[in-house]
Amino acid sequence: MPSADAQARPWVARARAALDALEHIVNGLGTSVLALVTLVLLIPVTALCLIGVGLPLAPLLVRMVHTVADRERARLTRWGPDVISPGPPPARLADALRHRGTQREIAWVALHAIAGFALGALGLTIALDTVRDGLFPLYWYLLPDGEAVPSLGLWVVHDVPGAFAVALLGVGWVFVSVALLPGMARLQALPGRRLLQPGPDTDLALRIAHLTATRAAALDAHTTELRRIERSLHDGTQNRLVGVNVLLGAARRALTRDVAEADAILGRAQDAAESALADLRAVVRSILPPVLAEGSLVGALTTLAANCPVETRIDADLPGRYASSVEASVYFIVAEGLTNIAKHSGAEHALVTLARREDLLRVEIADDGRGGAAEHGGTGLGGIRRRVEAHDGTFTLASPAGGPTTLMVSLPCGL
Amino acid sequence: MRIVIAEDDPLLREGVALLLRAEGLDVVATTDNPDDFLLAVDEHKPDVAIVDVRMPPTHTGEGIVAAVDARRRRPDLAVLVLSAYVEQAFATDLLASGSSRLGYLLKERVGRVTEFLDALRRVAGGGTAIDPEVVAQLLSRTRSDDRLDRLSPRERDVLALMAEGLGNGAIAERLVVTDGAVHKHIRNIFAKLDLAPDDSADRRVTAVLRYLENGRATPGRA
């Protein structure tokens, strides 16, 4: 996306766009090779189907077409508007062949296998020629005599000025790349964007299903949170207070018999009242940490890091404030993450990175410990996932045995 | 009176034990889970069991299940259930088999030591003790019943105490009236609610509770 800096120097933006386009073209070349393989299989199987023997293979191939199409959808979604997968094709072959989505997928396979592959190969050639000619003066003398030829085989180079002429040709290729590659990348993506987009009706149904699922997750997380609060109030505070009440009753009865006994019981009642207060404080803190109510998120996280027994650095680039539910969740996630690191990882250093990218708040918690963290080990990672999913965010954990462990979360922050 | 306590919160368990021992009652065992509780009932053969509704492992109705189980093994065991708040379903479960030797009290009642000990003795003596809160909820839920409206305020007070499981003498004492007056009120209540009159306290409780729960009389079965 164009930043103010790039607008000031358009050629920087152009060069960056050309590099991005090259990346897309190479990725597109990848999916076009898959499409080509599918097409190569599709032709003989269709022929065999016409004489009947290919029929058992056909459903397999329909599924293969869908899988390849889904890869292209994922590729297109990574650098443009979402292309949602309409789900697997109908199970019965006759239904699948009548299915509009499947027909469009097959058309795309044919188109992408030929046009996508050609564009990909051409784009890659232009890029390689740019490098090859641009760097020609550096290596031409290593080539056997008579084989020092620039791209397109235009002429044979025999001396240094000739080699620099080739380098000039390389500069020409740079201009060609900048001018052509972005357009080629768009052209290569066009069939996918046109043909792999689900129809308007499917689109809406999928979106509704998606929204329903995330809404249910949010409500569920809400219920889970309420149950957690109810449980901790019941098990902690309420029981303590009932105990205080019982002890006070006992003390009043003892007062008529023996003042010293009554005093001993009152002492226990006071201890119980203090522990009820401590419980209550812990519950309240877990709902909305007071540090967040008073100060900034980064300030609160810095305090967390300072209290962590593992040396922890906070690297935050987060101007302004976010919705309190988002801040509370980030705080909870970092607190859980650091607790895990302190308890299980054996790490010496931890790094918490926070950044905002468009409307996503990204949190990364990394340590240099022994790794092997699993979500089902009762480590609070399940709690993190539930809280993240309630916000419609994503949660990934990389923790190979031997370390290091990296926990990545991105939360939509609605800004 | 030999007592077994089943309560998973250590503070409350020890608090109740301390209270009862200070009153000279014989607390023979304290347990913190249903299994140990049943073992203690088998081993110590107590007269009364004081049981918490919520106990491990799931903290839902384990205490009620254990209490019902213990009563099946020893039908003459008196059970006083303690609950953190009114759980109508559990109270009803427990009373389904009759209200004799049964009590259901909120935990905060334990702090009112005199009333708690009264309830404990009543249950141990074959009677019933229902928490006033449970009775109040039943009364307010059946308010739409016009037969309840026929009761005078004093008769409603008597009905509530009756539903808690108090005998005529105890009701008279609470309301500061004579036994004879209570007897007259109770006769009127039974007549106005179309219930068969009964002087035995626990059968009376069953009749009243059933009436309050269903909002209709079940004459002859009281």
Image: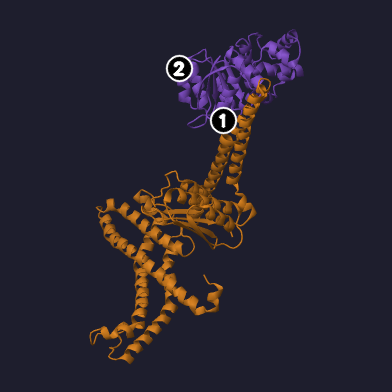
Chain colours: A orange, B purple
In the rendering, at what x and y percent does residue A195 appear? Answer: 43, 62
- Name the residue that disc number 2 marks: B43
Are the residues tagged 1 and 2 within 8 Å (C-beta)?
Answer: no
Label 1 marks which chain's residue?
B
Residue A240 x %, y %: 60, 33
In the displayed structure, A126 sits above or below A40; it is below
Q: Position of residue A237 (x, y in %)?
A: 60, 36
Residue A317 in the image, given as x and y percentages of width and height: 55, 63
Residue beneath disc 1: B11
Marked residue chain, label 2: B
Label 2 is placed on what type of residue? Glu
Judge whether residue B135 can be spotted in this image. no
Q: Is residue A4 above or below residue A345?
A: below
Q: Quadrant of residue A248?
A: top right
Where residue B202 sits, quadrant-wise, is top right
**Image quarter hosting the C terminus of chain A:** bottom right
Tag shown at residue B181 = none
